Amino acid sequence: MFAKAKCKLCGQSVRFALRHLNQKHPEVLDDKDVVKLKMENIMKKYFA
């Protein structure tokens, strides 16, 4: 079973991290530095 992650930006519990970032925080994915990060680092940076 997949657990939900809590977004550090807005506090919502989400199951699909990239979809949440794409829909709720598109400015994060527009940043060139974030695009270069691996999924593991994105989870550490934006989700608890």
Image (cartoon, rainbow, N blue to C red):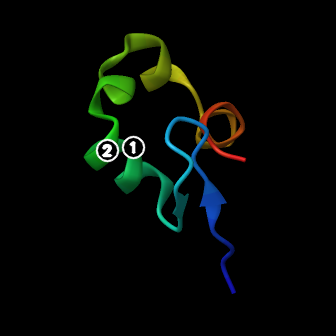
| Depth check, front residue: 37 or 3 | 3
Residue under label 2, please give it.
Answer: 24
Image marks 2 and 1: residues in contact by CB distance under 8 Å: yes
Residue at 30% x, 24% y: name it.
27
User: In which quarter of the view is residue 29 placed?
Assistant: top left
> How many residues crowd mark 2 within 10 Å: few (<14), some (14–19), many (20+)?
few
> How many residues crowd mark 1 within 10 Å: few (<14), some (14–19), many (20+)?
some
Residue at 68% x, 33% y: name it.
41
At label 1, the amino acid type is: Leu
- x and y, in percent, of residue 11 in the image: 56, 48
- x and y, in percent, of residue 12 in the image: 52, 56
Left or right, 25 with respect to 33, comes to left
Above-or-below relation of 32 to 7: above
Left or right, 38 with respect to 33, comes to right
Residue at the extreme front: 11
Left or right, 8 with respect to 28, comes to right
At label 2, the amino acid type is: Lys
| Depth check, front residue: 6 or 38 | 6
Residue at the extreme top: 32
Residue under label 1, please give it.
Answer: 21
